[in-house]
Image: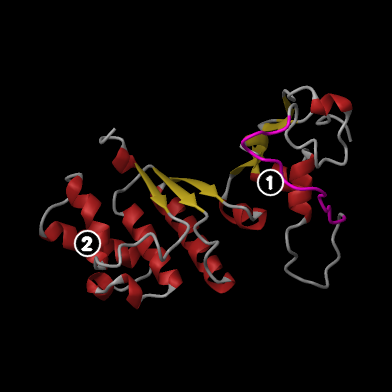
Amino acid sequence: MNRLRPRMQIIYQDPYGSLNPRLPVSETIGEAVRYHGIARGNDVKRLVKDVLRRVGLSPACAERYPHEFSGGQRQRIGIARALAMSPALIICDEPVSALDVSIQSQILNLLKDLQQQYGMALLFIAHGLHVVKHVSNRVAVMYLGRIAEIAPSQSLYSSPRHPYTKALVSAIPLPDPGHKRRTRRILLEGDVPSPIDPPAGCRFHTRCWLAEPRCAEQVPPPVEVAPGHVVWCHLANED
């Protein structure tokens, strides 16, 4: 497992709670590098400064502490910590949800640039489909712990097939408030069931306006509606 861990890193949701307030940035980034033997001595210092430059921070920040940075800067430090290990996969656990909207776009663009530059895979977890659309090539929509729809990004946003996905896409904010939506906003009724005791059959049927009796009895099988576009819904092939 130790050999696998350097290849997988994570960027946490909370840029405040994910950094040790007692450690300077150099220690936060260099700790895992030393532990896994990636670099030693002065090489660690050079690596820390290099990775700080890559995320848009000055190398002079290396000896400062987390409380001296803004939320966006702290998230850049979190990205630098993950990037220092040269991972093949970075799990981004809602990395922009705790940031101001103006800072969110900066962090998203940074992640996208780093992905293209270093060829890393990003597993991006978020509640906002408008954020996911900006960085993802392939999207999986989940409801109560079960995948409802998975598709290439362009296919999912242009032609969502699962009722839950349709509701999420309809709720994406419009950049221009004066621009009229092509489709009506879908408002879901009822509360989300308990994930400890989910409904039988399709887990979304208690809130689905299209639900049929079989939806409450049978778990829907996967249906491929287009190449690489799979939907778990009894009504997937119905308009």
Task: Give the class, few, some or many, for how many residues have Cα within 10 Å of label 2's Cα (few <14, many ≥20).
Answer: many
Q: Residue at x 49, y 58 (%)?
A: 95
The residue that label 1 is drawn on is 154
Highlighted magenta segment, given as a residue range: 184-199
> Picture coordinates of residue 214 (x, y %)?
84, 24
**The N terminus: image quadrant:** top left
**The C terminus: image quadrant:** top right
Distance of label 2 from label 1 (alpha carbons) = 41 Å
Left or right: 202 as drawn, with respect to 180: left
Q: Which amino acid does label 1 sit on?
A: Gln
User: Is 186 a magenta residue?
Assistant: yes
Count of marks, rendered view: 2
Q: Which amino acid does label 2 sit on?
A: Glu
Relative to the observer, which residue lies in front, 205 or 36? 205
Relative to the observer, which residue lies in front, 95 or 212? 212
The residue that label 2 is drawn on is 27
Left or right: 33 as drawn, with respect to 218: left
Task: Give the class, few, some or many, for how many residues have Cα within 10 Å of label 1's Cα (few <14, many ≥20).
Answer: some
Identify whether 206 is placed above or below 131.
above
